[in-house]
Image: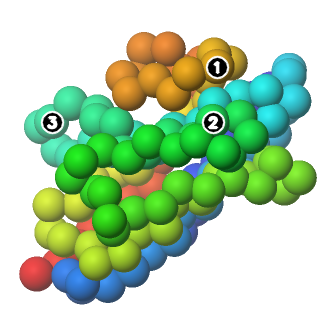
Amino acid sequence: QVQLVESGGGLVQAGGSLRLSCAASGLIYTFSSHTLGWFRQAPGKEREFVAGISRSGGNTWLADSVKGRFTISRDNAKKTVYLQMNNLKPEDTAVYYCAADLSTTIAVVPGPYDYWGQGTQVTVSS
């Protein structure tokens, strides 16, 4: 059974930092065969792309709204993907999801992703 388990969410003041982790298990193919992404969904809004990383970790893609503040990375040996979030803003408040995709390109929409975590809440107070 495939599982993606996010952790590291919480309540933080504006300007603060959080580091999200997503650990994978049960994947049919190796962890390094998957492109990985982070999405977020705020109440009443659609799920939106935040960051993506290629299989090797050599290529990353960030949404314009988080460029310069967020960083995505992965550790294939630990089967874990990370999202370092700095200078957090109230508008970053959302449930954050990690996702895995077997394609070779970083998808910026949810559709291509095969597996999803259950999400972790991030709340940024002003």
Mark 3 element type: loop
C-alpha separation, residue under disc 3 versus residue under disc 1: 28 Å
Please tell me which of labels 2 and 3 falls first in the chain: 3
Q: Which residue is mark 1?
A: 104
Please tell me which of labels 3 and 1 falls first in the chain: 3
C-alpha separation, residue under disc 1 versus residue under disc 2: 7 Å
Q: Nearer the viewer, residue 94 or 87?
A: 87
Please tell me which of labels 1 and 2 falls first in the chain: 2
Q: Position of residue 83 (x, y in %)?
A: 51, 60
Can residue 10 be seen at all in this image of the molecule?
no
At horizontal 21% and vertical 30% (from top left) the residue drawn is 46
**Which one is closest to the eye, mark 3 or mark 1?**
1
Q: Which residue is mark 2?
A: 54
**Which one is closest to the eye, mark 2 or mark 3?**
2
Q: Which residue is mark 3?
A: 45
**10 left or right, relative to 42:** right
**Quadrant location of the N terminus in the rendered image:** top right
Q: Name which quarter of the figure residue 75 lies in.
A: bottom right
Q: Say if mark 1 contacts mark 2, CB within 8 Å.
A: yes
Mark 2 element type: loop
Mark 1 element type: loop
Q: Say if mark 3 contacts mark 1, CB within 8 Å.
A: no
Q: Residues within 10 Å of mark 3 (few under 14, many from 20)?
A: few
Residue type highlighted by circle 3: Lys
